[in-house]
Image: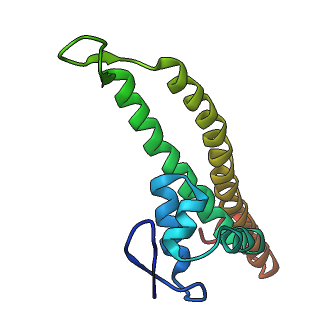
């Protein structure tokens, strides 16, 4: 284990098998690859290499980013609703301000990312449906070969 200078917590060494979990957890919290890699005790290039070479890790990465952007969206919605208190010139109390333009720009960026993540999730669901259909067809063929009626195939 090595100490991560930015978070002052113990993190797995680069070759430890659980750096991915630490990385993905941090990515879901921050949506920041560089900071997540630092918390996991690896370089960003190690994470990018793993994403490029491991489709399952790539899907987990996307899921973590999707979760991170959901958190960001909730934070921005809170700011839109409540605003931020900023010091007002010459006043004893701060003034509540709303930075709607920035919030909307970030939400638009998130919308594109969320749409991609949802499409990827739907593709995985589509693969499960296709596998189920293939299995059902295989059962029907087996019943037909055995001389039974196709309607007799078990579900």
Residue name at image x 51 percent, y 82 percent: 18
Residue name at image x 71 percent, y 61 percent: 127
Q: Is residue 110 left or right of residue 9?
A: right
In the image, residue 114 lies at what x, y percent?
A: 60, 41
Residue 135, visible in the rendered structure: no
Question: Vertically, is 107 above or below 141?
Answer: above
Question: Vertically, is 29 above or below 78?
Answer: below
Taking depth in this image into account, of 42 and 25 the one nearest to the observer is 42
In the image, residue 50 lies at what x, y percent?
A: 70, 74
Return the residue found at the far left: 92
In the image, residue 10 lies at what x, y percent?
A: 40, 80
Return the residue found at the far front: 90
Residue 63 lies in quadrant: bottom right
In the image, residue 135 lies at what x, y percent?
A: 71, 71
Question: Vertically, is 99 above or below 34?
Answer: above
Residue name at image x 49 percent, y 50 percent: 68
Taking depth in this image into account, of 10 and 62 the one nearest to the observer is 10
Residue name at image x 48 percent, y 53 percent: 30
Q: From the image, which quarter does the N terminus lie in?
A: bottom left
Q: From the image, which quarter does the C terminus lie in?
A: bottom right
Residue 144, visible in the rendered structure: yes
Q: How many marks?
A: 0
Q: Is residue 12 left or right of residue 153?
A: left
């Amino acid at each position: 284990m090595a100490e991560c200078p930015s978070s002052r917590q113990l993190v797995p060494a680069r070759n430890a098998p659980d750096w991915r979990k630490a990385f993905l957890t941090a990515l879901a919290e921050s949506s920041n690859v560089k900071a997540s890699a630092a918390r996991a005790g690896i370089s960003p290039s190690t994470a990018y290499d793993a994403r490029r070479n491991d489709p399952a890790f790539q899907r987990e990465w996307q899921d973590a980013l999707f979760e991170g952007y959901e958190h960001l969206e909730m934070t921005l919605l809170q700011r839109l609703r409540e605003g931020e208190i900023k010091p007002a010139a010459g006043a004893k109390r701060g003034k509540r301000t709303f930075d709607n333009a920035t919030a909307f720009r970030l939400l638009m960026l998130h919308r594109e990312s969320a749409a991609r993540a949802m499409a990827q999730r739907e593709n995985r669901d589509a693969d499960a449906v296709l596998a189920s259909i293939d299995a059902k067809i295989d059962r029907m063929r087996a019943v037909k070969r055995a001389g039974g009626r196709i309607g007799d195939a078990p579900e």
